[in-house]
Image (spheres, rainbow, N blue to C red):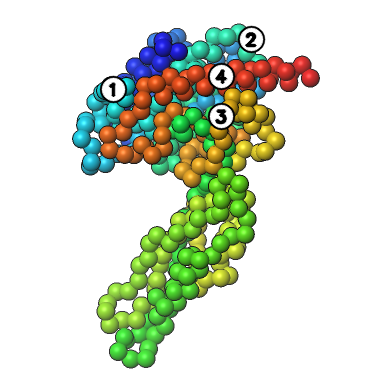
Amino acid sequence: MEKETNIATQLLKQLIAQTSFSKTEENAAAVFRNFLTKNAIPFQTQLNNTWATNKFYDKSKPTILLNSHIDTVKPNPNWTLNPFEPQEIDGKIYGLGSNDAGGSLVALSSTFLHFYALENLSFNIILLASAEEEISGKNGIESLSSITDNCEFAIIGEPTEMAAAVSERGLMVLDGKIIGKAGHAAREEGINAIYLAQKDIHFFETFEFEKTNPFLGKIKMSLTQINSGTHHNVVPSLCEYVVDIRMIPEYNFEEIIDLIQPQINGKIVARSMRLKPSILPTDHYFHSILSQLNIKSFGSSTLSDQALLNIASVKIGPGKSERSHSADEFIYKNEIGEGIEIYTKILHQLNQYFEQKATI
């Protein structure tokens, strides 16, 4: 895998050298498209998203989606290196987006090259470099549902140390509002909205949902913002708060709201119901492939583009989640090589699976 690793590493360095914040990924998209062009691979684009199919794409065959993202967060102020200057030191490749998720993207891309021109594959491959993942933007993978919905299965590249996230938390943010009645603080007047909020605060701190997930555990609720009052001598008539809820697949968004609302004083409204939790069904064939390759399964608390897909998927890639968004972010070169090797083995196993399925 040395040649493939070197190709992937060179592409990663080119990507690091570009500013590629969410919604402004044009330069990184251009680098990725140039990579495909140099390898004589036709591609399609939509805004800052780019995708390509294997050479012998056949509509009658199932399609596997290989996806990772080209956008990054902005560098935090604690960087000691230039985040846009790729540096290879002691086997580490430093640079913004190297770990999240450049390493996954280039490993998937190198794997795609390996399978691109194989004529007798039992499945199709789509390689997708998507935009706006870091902000779950609507111009990223969600805008390509006409393509992704027709895929059989998706492999999402994110730093997981090449373990497979077969379940992932979703996210729902609630805005709560409690209405009291204004009055003068020196007199027995008004209905204090802050006092009314005490019931809600206690609820979000202590309530536990009945269902749990075998990989993710229970739903996590955190009251993360609260605002009330205008003057020291006025009983506040309004208290507003924000609740961060990390979902599990056992509940849908509407169920959560229906369970919470009767037990609090405030009126809650969900900002969005887009970021769904996901789980790979226990009877899905990909579990057997993970078992055959001795790949560990786990549940992920961090969001990815899995949340915006309507098909079965796993999240797996080189690098460590803890390095994401950190100062002096890096990935080991040998982690990229390992990623290519495992991705390649996975696709070979998928090829065998679909070959056997076609004969039944």
Q: Residue furthest bottom?
A: 187
Q: Earlier in the sequence, mark 1 or mark 4?
A: 1
On screen, 23 above or below 93? below
Give the mark, 3 or 4, whose residue is nearer the N terminus. 3
Choose the circle earlier in sequence order: 2 or 1. Answer: 1
Q: Is residue 290 visible?
A: yes
What separation in Å lies between label 3 and label 1 (alpha carbons)? 27 Å
For residue 90, which numbered disc appears in the image? Answer: 1
Q: CA distance from mark 1 to mark 4?
A: 28 Å
Residue 256 is situated, as x and y percent measured from the top left of the image, at 58, 58
Q: Residue at x 49, y 37 (%)?
A: 305
**In the picture, residue 107 is in which quadrant?**
top left
The kind of residue on which mark 3 rests is Ile
* Residue at x 52%, y 22% (from the top left corner): 343
**Numbered disc in front, either 1 or 4:** 1
Amino acid type, callout 2: Asn
Question: In the drawing, what numbered circle is on residue 295?
Answer: 3
Secondary structure under tag 2 reads loop
Real-space Cα separation, disc 4 to disc 2, in angstroms = 17 Å
On the image, the x and y values in percent for residue 325 come to 34, 39
Q: Quadrant of residue 263?
A: bottom right
Disc 4 versus disc 2: nearer the observer: 4
> Which residue lies at the image location 46% right of the left edge and 21% below the top edge?
338
- Between discs 3 and 2, the one toward the N terminus: 2
Q: Residue under circle 4?
A: 345
Residue topped by disc 2: 120
Along the polypeptide, which appears first: circle 3 or circle 1?
1
| C-alpha distance separating marks 3 and 4 | 11 Å
